[in-house]
Image: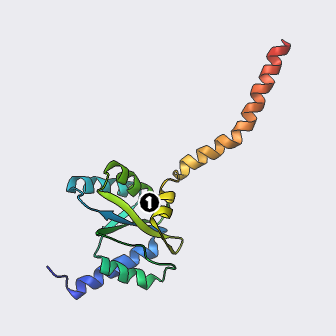
Amino acid sequence: MAISKDKKRAIVAKLADAFKEASSVVFVGFSKLTVKDASKMRKDLAQAGVRYYVAKKSLLRLALKQQGYTGEVPELPGEVAIAWTASDVTAPARGVHEYGTKLKGAVALLGGVFKGAFADVQRIVDIATIPPLPVLRGMFVNVINSPIQGLVVALDAIAKKRA
């Protein structure tokens, strides 16, 4: 069934709004994805603050053209969706990447938009492997604490040796 021009305008407007509010966007390729898996993925992404929307590629390209991102749009084969968020820039890529590893072949990253420029698949996968902000903070605290902890252990060893 063909989509009316009014419906197409509404979809392009929705995509344009999504791109304006997004801190990062990933293009998601999906094939052979069951309704059950798609629903679970949407629910889990929504809990992480990530929005997910499926649109025709022609309408997606039209909305992307309106945004004026730099670079070249990555190749978008097959069925395509977008995932985006306004807060955590790594959350869309990380969430989709996790499902891509769980559902081998059903979901894949195709590229995205990061810091106002198009990014290829490899860059988006690199972004997807960055740990979440709370984990990074914990790692930072551990790095700061490590020299102090080493000093305390050394002083304790010296105190035991003298006693």
145 with respect to 119 (left or right) = right
Which residue does the image show at 37% across and 50% down from the upper left? 101
Which residue does the image show at 31% across and 81% down from the upper left? 58
- Residue 129, percent from left and from top: 49, 53
- Residue 89, percent from left and from top: 50, 62
Which residue does the image show at 36% across and 76% down from the upper left? 15
Which residue does the image show at 39% across and 51% down from the upper left? 98
Asked which quadrant contains residue 82, the reply is bottom left
- Residue 5, percent from left and from top: 23, 88
Query: Regarding mark 1 in the picture, which secondary structure is present there?
Result: helix
148 with respect to 2 (left or right) = right
Quarter of the image where the C terminus is located: top right
Query: In this rendering, is residue 29 above or below 3?
Result: above
16 with respect to 159 (left or right) = left
- Residue 158, percent from left and from top: 82, 20
- Amino acid type, label 1: Ala
Query: In this rendering, is residue 129 above or below 142?
Result: below
Q: Disc 1 designates what residue?
A: 93
Q: Nearer the viewer, residue 90 or 137?
A: 90
